[in-house]
Amino acid sequence: MNIGKPERATQDRIISLFHDELGYSYLGNWIDREGNSNIEEELLAAYLTKNGYTRIQIGVALHLLKNAANRHNQSLYSNNQAVYSLLRYGVPVKTEAGKVTDSVQLINWQEPEKNDFAIAEEVTLRGKRERRPDIVLYVNGIAVGVLELKNSRVTIEDGIRQNLSNQQPEFNEWFFSTVQFIFAGNDSEGLRYGAIGTQEKYFLTWKEDEEDNSRFKLDKYLLKMCSKNRLIELMHDFVLFDGGIKKLPRFHQYFAIKAAQKHVRQHRGGIIWHTQGSGKSIVMVLLAKWILENNPNARVVIVTDRDELDKQIEGIFNDAGETIKRTTSGRELMSQLSQAKPRLLCSLVHKFGRKSANDFDAFIKDLESQPSKTVGEVFVFVDECHRTQSGKLHRAMKAIMPNAVFIGFTGTPLLKKDKQTSLEVFGGYIHTYKFSEAVEDKVVLDLVYEARDIDQRLGSEQKIDAWFEAKTKGLNDWQKDELKKHWGTMQKLLSSRSRMDRVVNDIIFDFSVKPRLSSERGNAILVASSIYEACKYFTLFQKTPFKGKCAVVTSYNPQAQDVTKEDTGANTETEKEFVYSTYTELLKNIETTPGMTKTETYEEKAKSLFIKEPANMKLLIVVDKLLTGFDAPPCTYLYIDKSMQDHGLFQAICRTNRLDGEDKDFGYIVDYKDLFKNLVNDRGTGALQVYSSELDRSAGGVDPDVLMQDRLKKGRERLDNALEALALLCEPVEPPKGELEYIHYFCGNTEIPTDLQEHETQRAALYKATASLVRAYANISDELESAGYSSSDTARIKQLLEHYLNIREIIRKASGESLDLKAYEADMRHLIDTYIEASEPRKVSSFEDMPLLELIVKTGIDKAIVTQLGGLKGNRNAVAETIENNVRSKIIKEHLNDPAYYEKMSALLDEIIAARKAKAIEYEEYLKRIADLVKQVEAGHEDDISEVLKKSPALRALYNNLQNQGGYSEDLAKESDEYVTPHDKVLALALRLDETVKRVRSDDWRGIEPVNG
């Protein structure tokens, strides 16, 4: 049978692929081999000998490489960066004083085929805890890739998580200091890849020759990425260490740079159009590095049109290890270009103008007749080229650098009116990666849109009450009561004349009920139409629970001269005075950061909190700042109360569609200005186009339209999909599909110790799918009717929702897994409390979230069953298996800390289970015995051990394991007569071992602070 083959079958096929098709040597199965290392010295020494290096050179090079890889006081990132530098540039070796330093090249970058490529399987890594990667890729004996494989029924994320845990200090972090590629794959989902430290959500997929569907995607993309030439090229030209994060390219970045390299070799310019959020800055850095390295005469100038972008680009290059000179004027840039160095510069486009030049055409002619002398071949990168490619300033730039090659970068589709000048200045398209492609590849999220007519909807008291009812349809009674306490104040504000008051309350209401906003994991940006309105909004939010949790960020910086001529004598505040006084008040307690103004310090702090601690900075109020450029922060919701269009609008809405967590499904746009009313798409898809017929379609390829989905239509589709996914997930559960059958399917058999672990994939899928269902329901719970559901549909959905939540809670308790077991569980409790109709009064028990075993110890088994397992409705087998699974889970988790003791506990558990199933004991007797076992498992020791052992788990583990191995040393027995019993003798030996370990442990022992000096 070919369906559902084991992981071993996949592994055998992949080993053959590497050996037969890619030409890698097979080193063998290293499961029992001693001394497996990330630097296989014999293999590396053999390669270097073959390439003419002396024994002394090889010895020194190996010593320096191992030192770089194993610096215990450095992070994995630092060690990996140090090793990469030696791989990339060679190891500087000096064999004798006074002799020239040689460079020992560990990898032949110019001739990839001349390196020794090899794989080994089941490479056992011994360290604090043993792990065994499925396949390791070696180049010249250096481990450069790790591949975890899963069978087609197990999610690829399991392989990713395995790789991530392997990199932890408590496992085998040391091995990954040389590793450049982390792969995970299976036959059903294909291949994902990342670097060391890459988080699960940022693992990437490759895409190439999409029409080729002849074999498993896993095989197809291993052949693409691990071919000898491609692997060496990716390592040499496409690895980036960027301010503490190691990055590998997405496929579109790789192919953009490959296309740009052809243009550069031919001295041709062009445009790279990659949609917002897809990583243009990485393309710029990697392309600049390649140009400078491959053309010794090249100079690269990066031109932007905003000061913030100029600073940002300087920061990005510096973080990536490339020193860049930031020029302050066109004159300084020309002065720098007339010398051989620096080779990498950045400048602002408006520095190319000259304020004193009244006759601009004459100024240009003058420049063209006497062009400045530039040393080398100049390549100019123009960022956001849709804003800077035309007009007088660009003419000046071309006149100053007449022989330069211009490459434009944009994330915004070029409108028809820009198209002609763009193509004249830059030439054609080098590479495009459009919005729809990025959404499909999950590089960015889809956008959903909602128009809100505040004025009309909230005109009268009746409308306000109707609005409240509609908004709270999905909430439970307790939540409605809490909101009604504040309703009197909100009613007054919403019915007041001030439209801005209504917008403020509308946003606050969203933060009470919308997923991510209510769970305090999401944040929002409000776009105001002027600095005055931004300040007005800010002062209104100061009278709400948002006080201290929102900030205003604009281009304004208060100066006393702003208001010196503003006093009208009429005892009223002008707009300028209001703005000045608002800023003066919010800045009064700010301590200035060196090198920054008070305003800059305030804005940086607000932006940092907004990104890192959304619970403490929920909302930023802006006008133009933070809506464009690299430093614009991502957010979940964008509220637009400003007339915007074209590029500015597109860049603003793209603040919301950045990936930043499992629980973010879309970027949400709330439009108070009816900006999109004329852009309804005529394709019948319920989507809105950000750009209509004006779009430039000359780039070819996929449709360049940027679409926003209608919120209700998308919401319904998502809810239906979430229900279907859960139905499919639970379909294999045996009839009659009661609690016990669900426990068996998602937790396994309590008698088999490994079953709980083996069913973890099903449980993870259940938790994830339930979280998705709750979010999908929460998004449109107050508008199910508007989304097209009948009253019977709504009742059915609520019933299913409660059904799946009950299953999830039963499985969570049965497996003993805590609420925050997975990243996507972080906000589940809040969402359930907020949106799900309670079938019983709100619980206030302090025991509700206490682990089951701890509760049994503290309150007794009967009370624990009532408190936490009441939902099992007295099903004795389900209750028993839930308790047993919790005990089994605890034993598995603690086993490595004290193997002897927990093996004994495991045997006791097996005995009790067998007695229960054989009906050899009554249920009451079973509960008593399992409760006694729980106490011992929770305590980590038996009741009758000596007091000294109770106090120290480490000493206890030594004692138990010595006793388990036959007791004690005969030599010790001869040394002293005071130990009269075997127990005393084993305890004495354990005490001596404990004391010795504490005395000789090194400074970097876990939990011990390093000794200074």
Image (cartoon, rainbow, N blue to C red):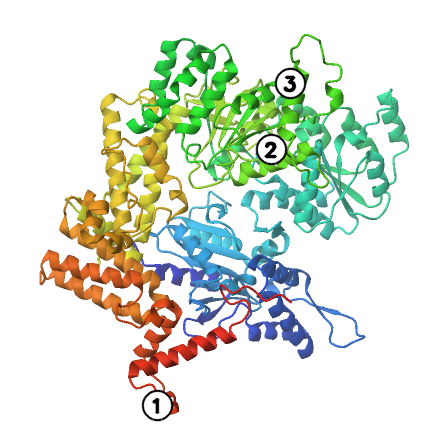
**445 or 630: nearer the eye?**
630
Residue 34 visible somewhere in the drawing: no
**Relative side of 62 to 454, left or right:** right
Residue at 49% x, 39% y: name it. 659
Q: How far separated are the C-alphas under marks 3 and 2? A: 37 Å
From this view, report whether residue 945 is shown above or below residue 979. above
How far across and down, in percent of the image, does residue 396 sit? Answer: 81, 29
Q: Quadrant of the N terminus?
A: bottom left
User: Are dots 1 and 3 in contact, CB under 8 Å?
Assistant: no
From this view, report whether residue 938 is shown above or below residue 822. below
Residue located beneath label 3 in the image: 578
How far across and down, in percent of the image, does residue 254 sit? Answer: 59, 46
- Mark 2: secondary structure: loop
Q: Amino acid at mark 2?
A: Gly
Which of marks 3 and 1 precedes in the sequence? 3
**145 or 504: nearer the eye?**
504
Q: Which mark is residue 411?
A: 2
Q: Amino acid at mark 3?
A: Phe
Other-residue count near label 3 (Cα within 10 Å), few / some / many at <14 / 14–19 / ≥20: some
Q: Which mark is residue 977?
A: 1
Q: Quadrant of the C terminus?
A: bottom right
